[in-house]
Amino acid sequence: MSSYINIYSLAFPFHEGDIRLLHPEIREDQTGDTFPCPPEFAKVEDVVLPDYDIETHKLVVSAPFKIDGVWKRQCSVLQMTADEITQRQNSIEEYKKIFPDAQANPTS
C-alpha cells in the first residue's frame, strides 16, 4: 500500500483513501499507478526491510525525507538492549496466556 506525505505540513502517513476524503473528485477506480496525487501530496517510496534476528534486534524506520526530488524513508537494524529483550519475552508470555492456541511467536 502506497503512502503519501503532505509536503506543506509534513503530516505522514496518508493513504489513497485518506486523500480521497480530502479530494472527493478522485474516482474509486483511480488507484495505484493511475492515482492522481494532488499537488500538496507526494508519494513516499516504500522502505526495503532488511533481514534481521527478531529475537535480538529491532527495526527503526525514519520519518520521510526528500533526496534528489524523491521522498524516501530509511530503515536501520539496531541491537536490542537486555531490558528490551526481557520486555519482549514477557510480552510473548503474556500473549500466550491470553491466546493459548495462537502461534508461539506473535511477532514473527
Image (cartoon, helix red, strand yellow):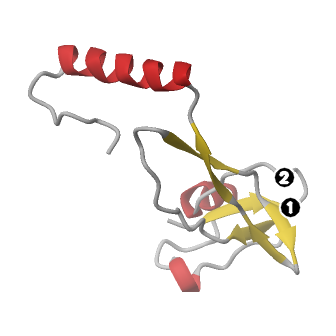
Q: Is residue 23 visible?
A: no
x, y percentage for residue 81? 58, 27
Amino acid type at image mark 1? Ile
**How dense is the environment of label 2, judged by Cα within 10 Å: few (below 14), some, or many (20 and up)?**
some
Q: Which residue position holds label 2? A: 10
Give left or right: position of 73 versus 77. right
Q: Quadrant of the C terminus?
A: top left
User: Could you say whether the residue bearing mark 2 is in a helix, strand or loop?
Assistant: loop
User: Could you say whether the residue bearing mark 1 is in a helix, strand or loop?
Assistant: loop
Q: Is residue 4 above or below residue 37?
A: above
Q: Which residue position holds label 1? A: 7
Q: Is residue 48 above or below residue 5?
A: below
Q: Nearer the viewer, residue 74 or 41?
A: 74
Give left or right: position of 60 versus 99. right
Q: CA distance from mark 1 to mark 2?
A: 5 Å
Give left or right: position of 57 versus 101. right
x, y percentage for residue 71? 78, 70
The residue positioned 42% from the left and 25% from the top of the image is 88
* Contact? badges 1 and 2 (CB < 8 Å): yes
Residue 48, labelled with which disc?
none
Amino acid type at image mark 2? Leu
The residue positioned 57% from the left and 85% from the top of the image is 34
x, y percentage for residue 15? 59, 59
The residue positioned 54% from the left and 18% from the top of the image is 83
x, y percentage for residue 67? 86, 73
